[in-house]
Image: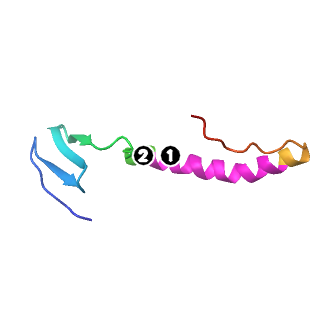
């Protein structure tokens, strides 16, 4: 892990298109501003952990749902790109 020290108003650049700036420091908390392309997802760690867990649960449920649809003779829906 790279560890950097930054003061209020200072920042770091990651790659050529992500910038993190220290916006505020008070009461043991640091506010960060993050500039990144819209295609880059930025999450707090606790939110990202929840997303990963929900994705795991959904992946486990998928085979069960597919098997249930087969027993009902319902064709699985193919994903299509709508323009």
- Tell me, for residue 50, which label it has, or none: 1
Q: Which residue is most to the bottom?
A: 1
- The residue that mark 2 highlights is 46
User: The C terminus appears in which quarter of the rendering?
Assistant: top right
Tell me: 46 left or right of 61.
left
Q: Residues within 10 Å of mark 2 (few under 14, many from 20)?
A: few
Crowding at label 1, few (<14), some or many (≥20) Cα neighbours within 10 Å?
few
Circle 2 SS class: helix
Q: Residue 48: x, y in percent?
A: 44, 47
In the depicted view, which residue is nearer to us: 41 or 76? 76
What segment carries the magenta color? 48-67
Q: Quadrant of residue 25?
A: top left
Left/right of residue 23 with respect to residue 36 in the rendered view: left
Q: Is residue 3 left or right of residue 52?
A: left
Identify the residue at image location x=29%, y=44%: 36
| Residue 11 among magenta residues | no
């Amino acid at each position: 892990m790279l560890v950097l020290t930054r003061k209020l108003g200072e920042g770091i650049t990651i790659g050529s298109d992500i910038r993190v700036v220290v916006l505020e420091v008070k009461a043991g908390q640091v506010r960060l501003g993050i500039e990144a392309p819209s295609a880059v997802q930025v999450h707090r760690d606790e939110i990202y952990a929840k997303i990963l867990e929900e994705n795991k649960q959904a992946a486990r449920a998928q085979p069960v749902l597919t098997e249930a649809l087969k027993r009902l003779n319902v064709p699985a829906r193919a994903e299509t790109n709508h323009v």
